[in-house]
Amino acid sequence: MAFFLVFIEIPLCMKCCPTSAKFDNFLTQFQNSFFRAAAYVVFAILMWLAFGIGGRTLQVISALTLTAAAGSYMVAALRHQTPASSTLTGGTGVSTIV
């Protein structure tokens, strides 16, 4: 789960790490806020299930964070906002979006 989140959220990893064209095409689907929201919902469900089965309290923090991220991406998708990227992490920067 963390592997995909790092590659989805930090564009610098796409530049530094050698990846295949198939993997790059898979990750470009997540440039849409609806797909990101769906991915975070799936990850949050997995964490909630893990918490229910294992009962570790630290998993609640991960599940809540993933749920909040899914909600944030869903609001952004409904408002037709595109994900912003920072030049610090290898993206294009927010100045090109405004």
Image (tube, rainbow, N blue to C red):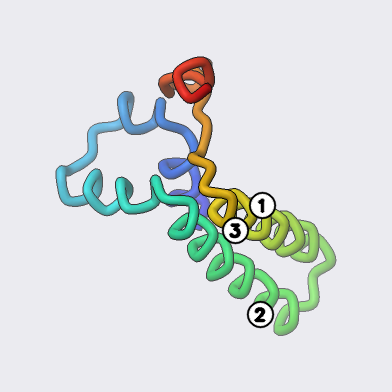
Q: Is 88 situated left or right of 17 in this image?
A: right
Separation (CA) of disc 3 from disc 2: 21 Å
Q: Position of residue 17 (x, y in %)?
A: 30, 31
SS at badge 2? helix
Give the vertical position of 66 relative to 83 (above or below). below
Q: Is 28 situated left or right of 84 in this image?
A: left
Q: Is 15 situated left or right of 52 in this image?
A: left
User: Which residue is pictured at 49% across the width and 40% down the height?
Assistant: 82
* Numbered disc in front, either 2 or 1: 1
Q: Which label was assigned to residue 74? A: 3
- Which class describes the residues within 10 Å of circle 1: few (<14), some (14-19), or many (20+)? some
Instruction: Identify the residue under disc 1.
Output: 72
- Which class describes the residues within 10 Å of circle 3: few (<14), some (14-19), or many (20+)? many
Instruction: Identify the residue under disc 2.
Output: 49
Separation (CA) of disc 2 from disc 1: 21 Å
- Which class describes the residues within 10 Å of circle 2: few (<14), some (14-19), or many (20+)? some
Q: Position of residue 89 (x, y in %)?
A: 49, 22
Give the vertical position of 45 relative to 89 (above or below). below
SS at badge 3? helix
Could you say which quadrant of the image residue 11 lies in? top left
Q: Nearer the viewer, residue 56 or 97?
A: 97
Q: Residue furthest right?
A: 57
Verify CB contact (< 8 Å) between mark 3 and mark 1. Answer: yes
Residue type (three-letter) at the residue carrying disc 3: Met
Give the vertical position of 6 relative to 84 (above or below). below
Q: Nearer the viewer, residue 77 or 54?
A: 77
User: Which residue is pictured at 41% across the width and 26% down the height?
Assistant: 12
Residue type (three-letter) at the residue carrying disc 2: Leu
Verify CB contact (< 8 Å) between mark 3 and mark 2. Answer: no
SS at badge 1? helix
Separation (CA) of disc 3 from disc 1: 5 Å
Q: Which label was assigned to residue 57? A: none
